[in-house]
């Protein structure tokens, strides 16, 4: 009796995507580094050796040592503990702002691109007005209207980033609405909402994912920048931007106070950008064809 060899099942889209990402060593390194930052933000107070909010004036301005890996600040608080604890506020701020921008920008872009006409003119006119302001200035204006505080900072940064996703999704929707499968769905009597959700939105996902990953670094920096200006939450709560602002006063006498949060912001944004480049290459058909 002959034995028929059954070929293994073809890898799915997710498997092919991760296979492409794994080929990019810099992207994998960025993902690992970002995973460590996320782990520190999640574990936070459970793993730090000192209370990040408790001052100890007798230990103020100590340089990095075995007892304090990153030194202490002007109030004697352990900087390593504050950097690890501050990762939670900074990451939640960046991710929250990214979520707000997606929630506002993606629906606006879908409606403008698919419906066209007056809706397109109205929504894109609003987008053009918002994009005429630099992102940080628009966020500052929103904070001035909403008031200071971490929640309002997240809303302001999300509002400033929303036009980027609106224009991106609009362009994709304009190209997809004339495709044969979309025209066929309309001809079969599908409602506009069903066509958009079932046929247009899935085609917009790859550029949304790439832009969202790359945009995360910008939102983290912007949230930290507003914290640097004193527009965030409680000054005693560890947050990288506020910590950097406090350390800027002692750059000559104790530069480690500013270098610790500044280095955390740098490494986090670098890790996000490295991983974002790998994601962009993995979703780019030309790059996939070149790599085989």
Image (cartoon, helix red, strand yellow):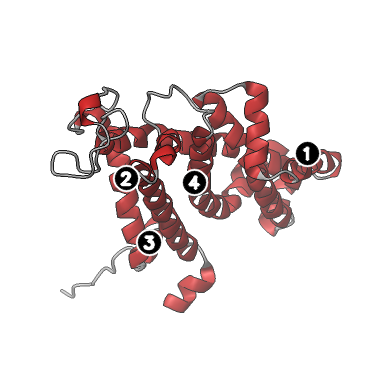
- Precedes in sequence: disc 3 or disc 4: 3
The C terminus lies in quadrant: bottom left
Residue sitting at x 27%, y 23%: 55
The answer to whether 51 appears left or right of 90 in the picture is: left
The N terminus lies in quadrant: bottom left
- Precedes in sequence: disc 3 or disc 2: 3
Q: Pointer 4 and pointer 1: residues touching (CB < 8 Å)?
A: no
> On the image, numbered disc 3 is attached to which residue?
27
Rendered position, 19 above or below 42: below
- Whole-angstrom CA distance, mark 3 to mark 4, is 15 Å
The answer to whether 70 appears left or right of 122 in the picture is: left
Asked which secondary structure carries label 1, the reply is: helix
Q: Nearer the viewer, residue 158 or 206?
A: 158
- Whole-angstrom CA distance, mark 3 to mark 1, is 36 Å
Q: Pointer 3 and pointer 4: residues touching (CB < 8 Å)?
A: no
Q: Position of residue 195 (x, y in %)?
A: 67, 43
Q: Quadrant of residue 291?
A: bottom left
- Precedes in sequence: disc 4 or disc 1: 1
> On the image, numbered disc 4 is attached to which residue?
216
**Disc number placed over residue 256 in the picture, else none:** 2
Asked which secondary structure carries label 3, the reply is: helix
Rendered position, 175 above or below 71: below
> On the image, numbered disc 1 is attached to which residue?
126
- Whole-angstrom CA distance, mark 3 to mark 2, is 29 Å
């Amino acid at each position: 009796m002959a034995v028929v060899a059954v070929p293994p099942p073809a890898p799915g889209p997710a498997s092919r995507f991760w296979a492409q990402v794994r080929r990019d060593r810099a992207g994998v390194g960025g993902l690992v580094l970002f995973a460590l930052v996320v782990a520190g933000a999640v574990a936070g107070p459970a793993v730090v050796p000192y209370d990040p909010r408790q001052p100890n004036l007798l230990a103020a301005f100590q340089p990095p040592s075995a007892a304090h890996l990153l030194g202490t600040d002007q109030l004697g608080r352990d900087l390593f503990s504050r950097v690890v604890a501050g990762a939670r506020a900074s990451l939640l701020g960046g991710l929250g702002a990214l979520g707000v921008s997606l929630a506002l920008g993606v629906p606006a872009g879908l409606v403008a691109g698919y419906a066209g006409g007056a809706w397109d003119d109205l929504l894109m006119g609003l987008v053009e007005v918002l994009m005429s302001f630099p992102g940080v200035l628009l966020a500052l204006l929103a904070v001035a209207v909403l008031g200071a505080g971490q929640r309002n900072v997240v809303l302001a940064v999300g509002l400033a980033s929303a036009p980027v996703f609106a224009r991106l999704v609009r362009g994709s929707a304009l190209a997809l609405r004339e495709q044969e499968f979309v025209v066929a769905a309309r001809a079969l009597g599908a409602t506009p909402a069903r066509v958009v959700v079932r046929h247009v939105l899935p085609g917009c996902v790859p550029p949304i994912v790439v832009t969202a990953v790359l945009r995360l670094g910008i939102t983290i920096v912007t949230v930290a920048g507003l914290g640097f200006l004193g527009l965030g939450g409680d000054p005693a709560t560890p947050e990288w931007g506020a910590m950097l602002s406090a350390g800027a006063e002692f750059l000559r006498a104790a530069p480690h106070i500013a270098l610790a949060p500044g280095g955390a912001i740098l490494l986090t944004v670098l890790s996000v950008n490295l991983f974002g480049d790998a994601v962009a290459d993995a979703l780019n058909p030309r790059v996939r064809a070149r790599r085989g």
